[in-house]
Image (cartoon, grey):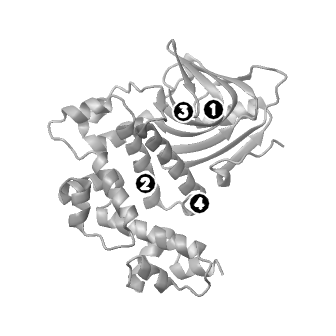
Amino acid sequence: MAQEFAMNLFNHHVFSSTNIDEIRHVLGKQFTPHELNITNKKARLNSSVCSCVVNKLRLSSFSYGEGAPIEALVKEDQCSEVISLNFQTSGSGRLQQHGEASDISANQGLIINMDRPYKLDLQGYAGDALIFSHDALRQHARGLLGEKAGSIDFKLAKSVDLTKPAGQALKNAVAYAMKEMNGPLGVLMNPISLANLENYLLTQFISLHPNSFADIVESAANPVIMPRNLKRARDYIHAHAHAKITVEELATYAGCSYRSLQNIFGNVLGMSPMEYLRSVRLEGIRDELLNTSDKQRTVTEIANQWGIVHMGRLAYLYRKQFGELPSDTLNSQK
């Protein structure tokens, strides 16, 4: 039995193995079929994979084992319409594709466009990956930017600079998604929450990664409100969820009209700003119910601190979002 690694998705363990053929088979299903070889026959392979799906996306956390030298090779007949966004947690790696080389390190993430052959050399590598298809990205871009997005030529960069805010934000989005899926959301698999998480990840990739989407955004005849406004509104909601928030102050902070803000929330997250605020408050209530150390605290007391005073309405919304009543959550901790 292979050694277990502490990874971000440990509650979604798929397998552990020291067998190169088994590892090749499992990872081939998650990414794309590929050759996988140990470049030093004396090295000991000790692999572990954790993985889960977020609608059309896949999150994966995996390790080949400390010091294991691996060569992954995708040939012409193994290519597929898949994109993999990768962040290293240990070890090192180098991608070679179309005569260019890109390293993956603590300061640089790696984007692998699997529609063309490539070679990946890894040394004691462990990391996290967000995996999605060209079609999923194109569909989301169309919803965000309009029909022009359907004709995008995916000329993606091969790396993400993690020393810059844009790269850090993208990595943080993946880390946030993994934390959510490793917790209650990954058990409940609430369809609304999963859709929101999927939209968030794809929007971050589109808005924060420098690629050909920018040309469509800048040249659009009827400009849309860009994710910057959405991010400002979301940040404001998370920072002030305990307090009263009006639509006027939310729009003012986001830097656009409330109608425009409604449109972008609807297109990207599938809900209005106020519905998003309600969802954040419900998540906050649930977190406190799950983690309170005070056995005397009640659902009413916790809900009131989050600005919700109608207990009947709370019970209905809470059950709709999490599949159980608030009292059930609280009692499970006693």
User: Label 3 near label 2: C-beta < 8 Å?
Assistant: no
- Report the quarter where the C terminus lies: bottom right
**Secondary structure under the numbered disc 4 in the rendered image:** loop
Query: What whole-number distance in Å separates the C-alpha atoms at marks 1 and 2?
Result: 26 Å
Q: Amino acid at mark 1?
A: Gly
Q: Earlier in the sequence, mark 4 or mark 1?
A: 1
Provide the residue designation for mark 2. 195
Percent x, y of residue 295: 62, 84
User: Label 3 near label 4: C-beta < 8 Å?
Assistant: no
The label shown at residue 28 is: 1
User: Label 3 near label 1: C-beta < 8 Å?
Assistant: no
Identify which residue is drawn at 61% across, 28% down.
33
Percent x, y of residue 127: 62, 38
Identify which residue is drawn at 63% across, 32% down.
28
**Secondary structure under the numbered disc 3 in the rendered image:** loop
Q: Choose mark 4 or mark 1, whichever is in front.
A: 4
Provide the residue designation for mark 4. 183
Identify which residue is drawn at 80% across, 35% down.
18
Residue 116 appears in the figure: yes
Q: Compared with residue 31, is residue 317 higher up or lower down, i.e. above or below?
A: below
Q: Choose mark 1 or mark 3, whichever is in front.
A: 3
